[in-house]
Image: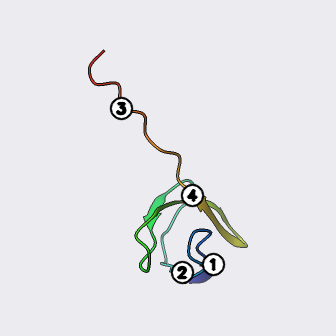
């Protein structure tokens, strides 16, 4: 298991076994969506926001 820090609230986040790069996880402290950008060392970034197309 790897540990990293939330870029939004600086909370420690433990990546569970089986977590993959580019996976979206949620910070347990502030609830922001994070993208796993690396596993060794463990790093995360704020996940890109999905653009709504509203069916256009």
In space, the residues marked 2 and 3 are separated at their CA atoms by 29 Å
Q: Say which element carries label 4.
A: strand
Q: Position of residue 48 (x, y in %)?
A: 53, 46
Query: Label 3, on which residue?
Result: 52
In space, the residues marked 4 and 3 are separated at their CA atoms by 18 Å
In space, the residues marked 1 and 3 are separated at their CA atoms by 30 Å
**Mark 2 touches mark 3? (CB < 8 Å):** no
Local crowd at mark 2 within 10 Å, few (<14), some, or many (≥20)?
Answer: some
**Mark 4 touches mark 2? (CB < 8 Å):** no
Query: Label 4, on which residue?
Result: 46
Q: Which mark is residue 42?
A: none
Local crowd at mark 4 within 10 Å, few (<14), some, or many (≥20)?
Answer: some
**Mark 1 touches mark 3? (CB < 8 Å):** no
Going from N to C along the chain, the mark reached first, 4 or 2, is: 2
Which one is closest to the eye, mark 1 or mark 4? 4
In space, the residues marked 4 and 2 are separated at their CA atoms by 13 Å
Going from N to C along the chain, the mark reached first, 2 or 1, is: 1
Residue 50, compared with residue 44, is above or below; it is above
Colour mode? Answer: rainbow
Which corner quadrant holds the N terminus? Answer: bottom right
Q: Quadrant of residue 41?
A: bottom right
Query: Label 1, on which residue?
Result: 4
Q: Say which element carries label 1.
A: strand
Residue at image position (30%, 15%) is 56
Residue at image position (71%, 71%) is 40
52 and 34: which is toward the camera: 52
Which one is closest to the eye, mark 2 or mark 3? 3
Q: Quadrant of residue 9?
A: bottom right
**Mark 2 touches mark 1? (CB < 8 Å):** yes
43 and 47: which is toward the camera: 47
Query: Label 2, on which residue?
Result: 13
């Amino acid at each position: 298991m790897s540990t990293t820090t939330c870029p939004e609230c600086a909370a420690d986040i433990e990546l569970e076994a089986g977590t993959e790069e580019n996976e979206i996880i949620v910070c347990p402290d502030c609830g922001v969506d994070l993208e796993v950008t690396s596993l060794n060392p463990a790093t995360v970034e704020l996940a890109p926001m999905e653009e709504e197309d509203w069916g256009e």
